[in-house]
Amino acid sequence: MTRTAILGMGHYVPSKVVTNDDLAKMFDTSDEWIQQRTGIKERRYIEKSGIGASDLALHATKMACENAGVEVLEIDAIIFATLSPDHNFPGSGCFLGDKLGLGGVPALDVRNQCSGFLYGLQIADAWVRCGMYKRVLLVGAEVHSTALDFSDEGRDVTVIFGDGAACAILGPTDDEDQGIIDVEVHADGSGAKELWLEAPASAYEPRLTHEMIDNKSVYPQMNGRHVFRWATAKMPEVSLSVLERNGVTVEDLDLVVPHQANKRINEFVSQKMSIPPEKVVHNIQKYGNTTAASIPLALSEAIQEGRAKKGDLVLMPAFGSGFTWGAALVRL
Ligand code: UT7
């Protein structure tokens, strides 16, 4: 039976490094607080206005194609996961397709926040296995820095987010020992307003007012403790569900690449599942939370560093706004 393999991965982060001390110059926070509560030391921001998620994705795509040994023009479908599209519409997948010279190639935007890469992976897997497409570009890319509240009021959210992009080229393989084994995803909209960006909104007329800017509903709002509780419950739950369904134990796993929202969340999840710390990939200290980009960014780096190798069995759990959550099990 045909399976879907990750043929190659790539990532890109902007060059502008913003440390915790840099943020502490703008509002009331400290390097100590941020490191203790989140594990983050620094994050990247776009260098100047005018750089969108699709621009970051363009660099990542070139690296992924090179690593996959695939020409850009061989890509026959794009899936673009982001919560910070370049513009409200059209989707960032269309902008990226144009930048890659892929006129006519279908482009699907996925709006599932921190779980976006997993939702995209499930779709890409189905497309490839049914023979519809042969070279799917799956992107996770975000520019958060242009919608953050750099004041005391927004500090809980602002310190965690960073910009970045990463992607995978997916294609068919007959190798039974390689590829996507399973992807399980969920959503529960009862938590929608616990982590959201309210405005501009088509639900309001007009969509954007001076009042919305003044009352800060143009910045993401989060009930951090509530999200934390859900994340630490749902990530182990969905991970164990995927492992059990596929007859895999925690001992069988070579690597766990979790969504990078907060190092404490991932430590908590690994403890709950008895995963040895050395099997868990963290890069949140360098990039903060890059939402849809975070899992592919961590996996791509792990492959580049030789920490993730062909044949490794990898678990990728995520939780985020929506609420949405899921886990993927992949043999590299
Ligand atoms: O990727 C999407 C999913 N997102 C997540 O999974 C995030 C989940 N939540 C979290 O990671 C944590 O809730 C945060 C890191 C966002 C916050 O950590 P916390 O331990 O839950 O802190 P808190 O919001 O309960 O605030 C504790 C204290 C408060 O002060 P008081 O009331 O105790 O005096 C806050 O005002 O820390 C204060 N605080 C800060 N202090 C310095 C909140 N943010 C900051 C800050 N710097 N940036």
Image (cartoon, rainbow, N blue to C red):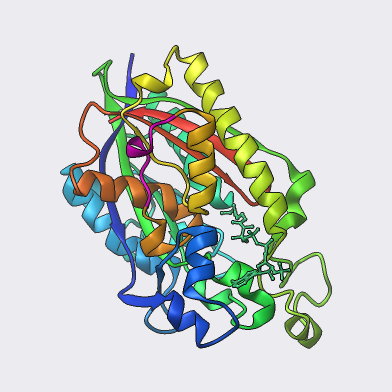
Q: In the rendered structure, does residue 278 fall within the stretch colored magenta?
A: yes
Q: Please state which of residues 155 and 53 is positioned toward the viewer in this rendering.
A: 155
Residue 125: x and y, percent?
42, 31
Q: Is residue 48 above or below residue 293?
A: below
Residue 161: x and y, percent?
51, 66
Q: Is residue 263 above or below residue 185?
A: below
Residue 204: x and y, percent?
83, 70
In the picture, which quadrant includes the C terminus? top left
| Quadrant of res 221 | bottom right
- Name the residue at 27% across, 52% down: 10
- Name the residue at 41% across, 69% down: 43
Q: In the rendered structure, does residue 116 fall within the stretch colored magenta?
A: no
| Ligand 1 lies in quarter | bottom right
Residue 167 appears in the rendering:
yes
In the picture, which quadrant includes the N terminus? top left
| The magenta segment | 275-282
Q: Please state which of residues 106 and 70 is positioned toward the viewer in this rendering.
A: 70
Q: Is residue 166 above or below residue 25?
A: above
Q: Please state which of residues 122 and 330 is positioned toward the viewer in this rendering.
A: 330
Residue 86 appears in the rendering:
no
Horizontal arrangement in the rendering, residue 188 relative to residue 92 (left or right): right
Magenta span: helix, strand or loop, mainly? Answer: loop
Residue at the extreme right: 205
Residue 117: x and y, percent?
47, 45
- Name the residue at 43% across, 67% down: 163
